[in-house]
Amino acid sequence: MRLTRYTDYALRTLIYVGLREPRQSSIAEIAAAYGISESHLTKVVHQLGRLGLIQTIRGRGGGLRLAKAPAEIVVGAVVRQTEDDLALVDCFAGVGCAITAPCRLRRVLGEALAAFLAVLDRTTLADLLGGSEGDEIARLLGVSGPVPDPVAEGGPG
């Protein structure tokens, strides 16, 4: 199975924006960090906004932020919402096949797809951002760590 570039860009966008929280990100920053097309990314960001995953702020000082906490963004849900077609073979999509009824391959592939999605369903954006791997991803993308919250740090608030 192979995910589309669209889904790849959606997941990468969420990772980038999540690493930048609470600061805003821009499409230009994300595109430059990953070396991808701004026009393709604009379409992805638009859908992520419609799905309630990204908040887009227009105008001067605008940008992108997560609309939900990273722990509330489930990777499996993002994949289901951004992939047009998860049918591994034609019979999953209702296309006729001479051996569909007794076919064991269909059952095995169905189990494999379910297992794939089950792993993604127990993975959140927070899982992808955390730990030393998240720090390394931030370093590779040129994203510095989160801005400290002055209230949480005991500063003025």
Image (cartoon, grey):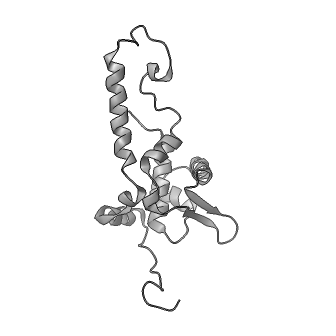
When the figure is inspected, residue 99 is found, relative to residue 76, above or below; the finding is above
Residue depicted at 60% across the width and 54% down the height? 49
In the picture, measured across the screen, residue 17 lies left or right of residue 55, that is: left
Residue depicted at 41% across the width and 73% down the height? 145
Residue depicted at 50% across the width and 32% down the height? 85
Q: Position of residue 56 (x, y in %)?
A: 63, 61
When the figure is inspected, residue 3 is found, relative to residue 157, above or below; the finding is above
Q: Position of residue 47 (x, y in %)?
A: 60, 48
When the figure is inspected, residue 28 is found, relative to residue 3, above or below; the finding is below
Q: Residue furthest bottom?
A: 156
Viewer-side residue, 127 vs 118: 118
Viewer-side residue, 118 vs 83: 118
Q: Residue furthest front?
A: 101
Q: Residue furthest right?
A: 59
When the figure is inspected, residue 30 is found, relative to residue 78, above or below; the finding is below
Q: Looking at the rendering, which quadrant does residue 100 occupy?
A: top left
Q: Position of residue 5 (x, y in %)?
A: 48, 41
In the picture, measured across the screen, residue 43 lies left or right of residue 91, that is: right
Q: How many marks?
A: 0
Q: Residue furthest top?
A: 98
Residue depicted at 46% across the width and 91% down the height? 155
Quarter that holds the N terminus? top left
